Amino acid sequence: MDLNNKIEKIGIVFAMKGEALATIHHFNLERINGNYPVELYGNAENKIVVSLNGTCSFTGVDNVGTQAATLNTYVLINEVNPDIVINAGTAGGFAHSGAKIGDVYIGTNRVVYHDRRIPLPKFDEYGIGNYGLINTDYLAKQIGIKQGIISTGNSLDYVDRDLQLMKMSNASLKDMEAASVAWVCQLLNKTFIPIKSVTDMVDGGIPTEVEFKANFNLATKNLNLKLIQLIDFIYQKTMEEIVSPEK
Ligand code: ADE
């Protein structure tokens, strides 16, 4: 990452259309070409581009999870070449780490996986992923949001071993995309920032799907407010101006 690079093009990866609509409307984005199933929405000169995973042609639901997010991120970078990639979406939060329904978090430190269990030398480490992030302390303060480690898997629920791995990673949030977006950004040398809002408590005892549906609108509203603030804040700044100096 060149610290003097100005952020003039921002790409935002979303899984679900419902999560992205307020941002698409706010910036007056219109559908631009995107390889099926990925849907790209851009403004003049594509300074801000929202990229959706698109819908499943068999079931009609939004494509979610790491497979679709990997393709989405690749198509976005290949077609638009943004200076920075943001992954925005909803997540489960851990009450024991202080998360509450509707809270918005920016990722800190690293992004990991909790469902790639490969108990073989080196493959175990590969499975966890451990994709490093820029220091987001300054951004979190400026935008007024919490920071946390995000752990990614391909299920809305979890099995006991997932939970153990999330605890070992000190995760505050559980999502279904961030680590896969981080991987593509690492491969293609793009700065990556995840921002997530909490729909459900992973350790709260209520079935995830019940809480997810009940809180989706609130979490999405909060997510879009903070995402727009984040975009406005980083646009036209250099990397140096948004990254906290290392202590
Ligand atoms: N998105 C919203 N809630 C989630 C959860 N509990 N796990 C994974 N992704 C989520």
Image: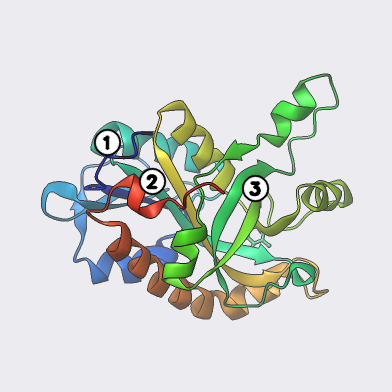
Q: Which residue is mark 1?
A: 81
Residue 110's x, y, as percent? 61, 44
The image quadrant of residue 50 is bottom left
Q: Are marks 2 and 3 in contact (CB under 8 Å)?
A: no
Q: Residues within 10 Å of mark 1 (few under 14, many from 20)?
A: some
Q: Rounded to the nearest whole Å, what is the CA distance between mark 3 and mark 1?
A: 25 Å
Q: Which residue is mark 3?
A: 152
Residue 63 in sight here:
yes
Disc 2 marks a residue whose amino acid type is: Val
Q: Residue furthest front?
A: 247
Disc 1 marks a residue whose amino acid type is: Asn
Q: Which residue is mark 2?
A: 85
Residue 179 lies, with reference to residue 138, above or below; the image says above
Residue occupying image coordinates x 24% and y 39% = 80
Q: Rounded to the nearest whole Å, what is the CA distance between mark 1 and mark 2?
A: 9 Å
Give the SS element for disc 3.
Answer: strand
The image quadrant of residue 101 is bottom right
Residue 142 lies, with reference to residue 110, above or below; the image says below
Residue occupying image coordinates x 41% and y 41% = 191
Q: Tag count in the figure?
A: 3
